Every structure is written in structure tokens, then in C-alpha cells.
Image: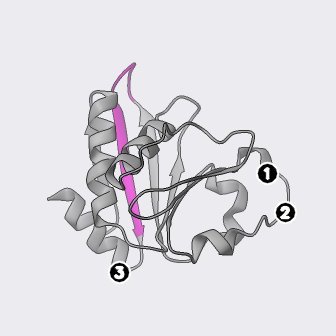
Amino acid sequence: MKSIKFITKTEGETERLAKKLAILLRAGDVITLKGDLGAGKTTFTKGLGAGLGVKRTINSPTFTIVKTYQGELPLYHMDVYRLEGSEEDIGFDEYFYSDGISVVEWPQFIEEFLPKERLDIVITSTNEKEREITCYPIGDHFERVCEGLAR
């Protein structure tokens, strides 16, 4: 499987797709989210959190870099935009190889720290509400996850 594409027409549909994805994930999974500002990365993460049973409001961790949310599995939400041009490793392995799900916004800035197997997602705004969400599974586990998501 090379990639799989979904079109969502509302924020609610984007959240529902992410919620469905959450059910297919397991501890230690890493999801990367690429997209322009306002593309829906945080909206997608809110849906993922809902699918994991997170009760707290999820918002972008722009100033803290990592926010942790407790659900059925911990959700580690990272916004590494501010690490652009930095070689700083803030202990990524402690998150990536842990008991939780890691979501990384702006992953291109920490490419060398990302695990080899992961699910890369690109979110593109096609208009005010509609989003094109393309999933690029890297590894057998994530290919199965994407097959499940497509069902």
C-alpha cells in the first residue's frame, strides 16, 4: 500500500476519521501530521484523543512543545515547529517508544529523531471546510492500520 486518501467536508468528519484511526492504534505508535497553518492538524488530534478516551480539551502545544493527555492510552501531542533549525533532542525516544500514542505536528523539523515505522499524514485544505487527508503508512503494522481505516 503506497498511500490512501480521504476527503472530509466538515471538522466533525475530520474528527470522526481520526477517532476511527485511534481505535486501530497500539502503544508506541507514532503519527506525524503535516499541513499548512489552519489545515486541521489540531482538529485531527482532537478526534484521535476522543477515540482514545481523552476527556480534557486538546489544543495546540505551540509553546510547550509536548502536551500529555490521559486516555485509555496516553496521548503525547507534539508541535515541534519551534525546533526548526535546532538539533535539540528533547527526549523524543521516551515518547516514541512508550506506552502511549505520539502525534507530531511539523515532523520535518525533527526528521532524524522519528522512528522508521510510523504513519505519516498530510492534511490539505481544499476549501474553507473540506480537507484532503492522505495517509502514508511506513511499516506492515501501519499498512494494516490504513486498511482498517479504509473499511
Extent of the magenta region: 126-137
Quadrant of residue 64 in the image?
top right
State the CA–CA distance, disc 3 to disc 1.
30 Å
Q: Label 1 near label 3: C-beta < 8 Å?
A: no
Residue 11 drawn at (x, y percent): 34, 29
Residue type highlighted by circle 1? Leu
Q: Which residue is mark 2?
A: 88
Magenta span includes 128 = yes
Q: Which residue is mark 1?
A: 83
Q: Secondary structure at mark 1?
A: helix
Q: Which residue is mark 3?
A: 140
Q: Secondary structure at mark 3?
A: helix
Residue 53 drawn at (x, y percent): 35, 52
Residue type highlighted by circle 3? Asp
Q: Label 1 near label 2: C-beta < 8 Å?
A: yes
Q: Is residue 46 left or right of residue 105?
A: left
Residue type highlighted by circle 2? Glu
Quadrant of residue 124 in the image?
top left
Residue shown at the point (36%, 56%) measured from the top left: 52
Of mark 2 and mark 1, the one earlier in the sequence is: 1
State the CA–CA distance, disc 2 to disc 1.
7 Å
Tag 3: Cα neighbours inside 10 Å, few (<14), some, or many (≥20)? few
Magenta span includes 60 = no
Q: Secondary structure at mark 2?
A: loop
Tag 1: Cα neighbours inside 10 Å, few (<14), some, or many (≥20)? some
